[in-house]
Image (tube, grey):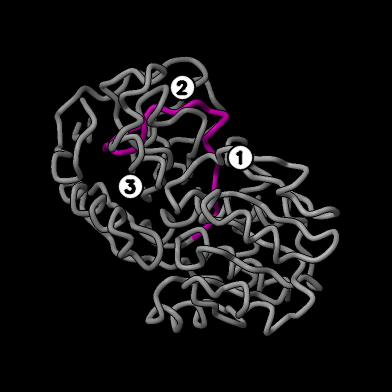
Amino acid sequence: MKAVVLYKTCSPEELTISEIPVPEVKSGWVLIKVKAFGLNRSELMMREYEGNAPYINLPRVLGIECVGEIADVSDSTFRKRQKVVALMGGMGRSFDGSYAEYALIPTKNVFTVETDLPWEELAAIPETYFTAYGSLFSSLQLSPEDILLVRGGTSAAGLSAIQLAKSIGATVLASTRKTHKRELLINQGADHVLIDDGTLKSQLLNLYPNGITKVLELVGPATLAESLSMVKLHGIVCVTGILGKKGTIENFYPIKDIPSGVYLTGFSSNNPTQQIMDDIFSRIKKHKLKPAIAKVFALSEIGQAHRLMENNEANGKVVVQTS
């Protein structure tokens, strides 16, 4: 089969297609005929530098999510050719992932879907909407009365979060560093767009002098301190992304850096379930949500796909079709 194998950390242009054997089925795992997959920041980090970490054993087929059909049910209760999505559980990290024509995935990380969406549209949903859904409704406990800031709103997760937050009637502010992306955010449902140019806090306080109730922090530790300062008493900030390419905070002093009565949490998309995936697809269908797709590539164009995402030029999810 054709697959994108990471042999060493490299540039996007160095990603190439290899011919490797189709994985052999084993108990507790199912073989998926991959139809398409979405790109994720973690895959870019793996390609760029994380592949050198001692806990990563290269070579490895990249990819933490995919959509497709069951090719071999193994000892599972799935049916052959059943439409499924798969995500997380070590895909593309501790075992070979989805950048391939076939993927062998643990049964617990494979979920059935009832949908007529085309493969490229379906591929834009699993990891992105699961991350947004979990961040909003589990970590942030979002309600219709909330005023939410999605910081890093033009990312795929940010655009999905805007849609999901508006589906329950919350007021949504979204930030971007580029003024020409204002219309994109408004079209996704944002009530207000803030330009992250060093004056974001003053823009927000002009709208809401007493602060807001919730922040979905997708830029990450680079802007966390400011985000914490913009929420009112008993407000919540959830750190989910690291678009700012800074994963830690040096000399973090929680007693001083977290305002009294403000809550700091996070979301890691490590534990998807069939129930959550059902809820997500039900919400997408009920509210007629449409995933924002930046561009669809062929598997042979994987380097171009990585370059587009790495340059922060994508307005939505970057999707790759395998056939």
Foreground disc of the pair 2, 1: 1
Indicate the secondary structure of the residue bearing disc 1.
loop
Q: CA distance from mark 2 to mark 1?
A: 21 Å
Q: Which residue is mark 2?
A: 74
Foreground disc of the pair 3, 2: 3
| Residue 264 screen position, x and y as percent | 73, 48
Name the residue: 69% across, 78% down. 205
| Residue 36 screen position, x and y as percent | 33, 49
Q: Magenta segment, which residues?
A: 97-115
Q: CA distance from mark 3 to mark 2?
A: 19 Å
Q: Is residue 137 above or below residue 290?
A: above
Task: Give the amino acid type for the residue marked by disc 3 in the picture.
Answer: Lys
Q: Is residue 244 above or below residue 185?
A: above
Occupied quadrant, residue 308: bottom left
Q: Which residue is nearer to you in this view: 17 or 26? A: 17
Name the residue: 19% across, 35% down. 2
Specify which label sits upstream in the sequence, 3 or 2: 3
Q: Is residue 58 above or below residue 133?
A: above
Q: Is residue 114 magenta?
A: yes
Label number found at residue 272? 1
Task: Give the amino acid type for the residue marked by disc 2 in the picture.
Answer: Ser
Label number found at residue 35? 3
